[in-house]
Image (cartoon, rainbow, N blue to C red):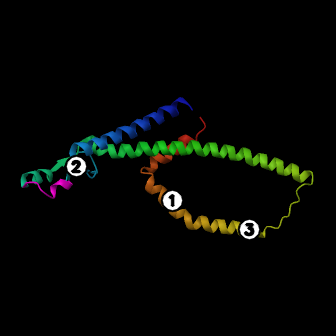
C-alpha cells in the first residue's frame, strides 16, 4: 500500500475515532442524547428522561432550557460517520480489487483448461442456448426485483455515501 493511501486511511480512522469520542463525551456530559443542529451555534431544546418524574420544578426548568451547541457537539456525529464510511469503503474497494484479480486468474485458467479439453476431444460443445437463455432471464428478473432492496439496505447502513464512495475508489486504486 502506498504512503498516501496509508495517510488517508489513518486520517479517516482518526476522524472516526475523534468523532466517536466527541459524540460519546457529549452524551456523558449532558446525560442524554442531543439532536444534532444544522450548524454550529444554533440553539436547540435539550430534554432528558429524568425531567419527567421526581424532580422539583427548578431542576426540570433548568433541563428544559435551550443552549447553543459547541462546535464539537455539532461536528462529532458527522465526523464519526464520514470517517467510518471512508474506512469501510476503502476496505470494500481493496477487497473488490483482490476479488476481481483472482476471478480473472481463475477464469483465464478455466478457459485454457476448457480449450485444451476441447482440442483433445474430451469435451464436445453443444451450442443449444435455450436453457442458458432461460437461466439468464430468471437471474436477471431476480436481480431486478432485489436490487432496489439491496441499494436501500446499503444506503441505510453506510452513513456517509460520499465518503464511502471516495474510500471505495481509493481502495480500488492500484497505487
Vertically, is 99 above or below 54?
above
Nearer the camera: disc 3 or disc 2: 3
**Mark 3 and mark 2: span between their CA atoms?**
60 Å
Nearer the camera: disc 2 or disc 1: 1
Residue 58, horizontal then vertical, whole percent = 7, 52
Q: Secondary structure at mark 1?
A: helix
Q: Let me know if residue 54 appears in the view.
A: yes
Q: Quadrant of the N terminus?
A: top right
Vertically, is 134 above or below 64?
below
Mark 3 or mark 2, which has the lower sequence index?
2
Q: Nearer the viewer, residue 134 or 164?
A: 134
For image coordinates 65% across by 46% down, the residue present is 100
Which span of residues is magenta-colored?
48-56
Mark 2 or mark 1, which has the lower sequence index?
2
Q: Is residue 57 left or right of residue 82?
A: left
Residue 118, horizontal then vertical, whole percent = 88, 53
Write down the residue under mark 1. 151
Would residue 54 be counted in the magenta stretch? yes
Mark 1 or mark 3, which has the lower sequence index?
3
Would residue 164 be counted in the magenta stretch? no
For image coordinates 39% across by 40% down, the residue present is 16
Write down the residue under mark 3. 133
Write down the residue under mark 2. 42
Q: Secondary structure at mark 3?
A: helix
Amino acid at each position: 500500500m502506498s504512503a498516501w493511501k496509508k495517510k488517508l486511511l489513518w486520517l479517516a480512522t482518526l476522524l472516526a475515532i475523534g468523532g466517536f469520542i466527541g459524540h460519546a463525551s457529549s452524551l456523558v456530559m449532558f446525560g442524554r442524547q442531543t439532536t444534532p443542529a444544522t450548524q454550529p451555534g444554533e440553539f436547540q431544546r435539550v430534554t432528558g428522561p429524568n425531567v419527567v418524574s421526581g424532580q422539583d420544578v427548578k431542576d426540570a426548568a433548568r433541563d428544559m432550557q435551550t443552549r447553543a451547541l459547541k462546535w464539537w457537539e455539532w461536528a462529532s456525529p458527522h465526523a464519526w460517520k464520514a470517517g467510518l464510511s471512508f474506512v469501510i469503503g476503502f476496505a470494500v474497494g481493496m477487497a473488490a480489487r483482490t476479488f476481481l484479480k483472482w476471478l480473472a486468474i481463475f477464469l483465464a485458467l478455466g478457459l485454457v483448461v476448457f480449450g485444451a479439453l476441447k482440442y483433445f476431444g474430451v469435451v464436445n460443445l453443444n451450442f443449444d442456448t435455450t436453457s442458458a437463455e432461460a437461466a439468464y432471464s430468471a437471474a436477471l428478473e431476480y436481480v431486478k426485483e432485489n436490487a432496489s432492496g439491496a441499494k436501500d439496505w446499503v444506503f441505510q447502513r453506510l452513513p456517509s455515501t460520499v465518503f464511502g464512495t471516495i474510500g471505495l475508489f481509493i481502495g480500488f486504486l492500484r497505487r
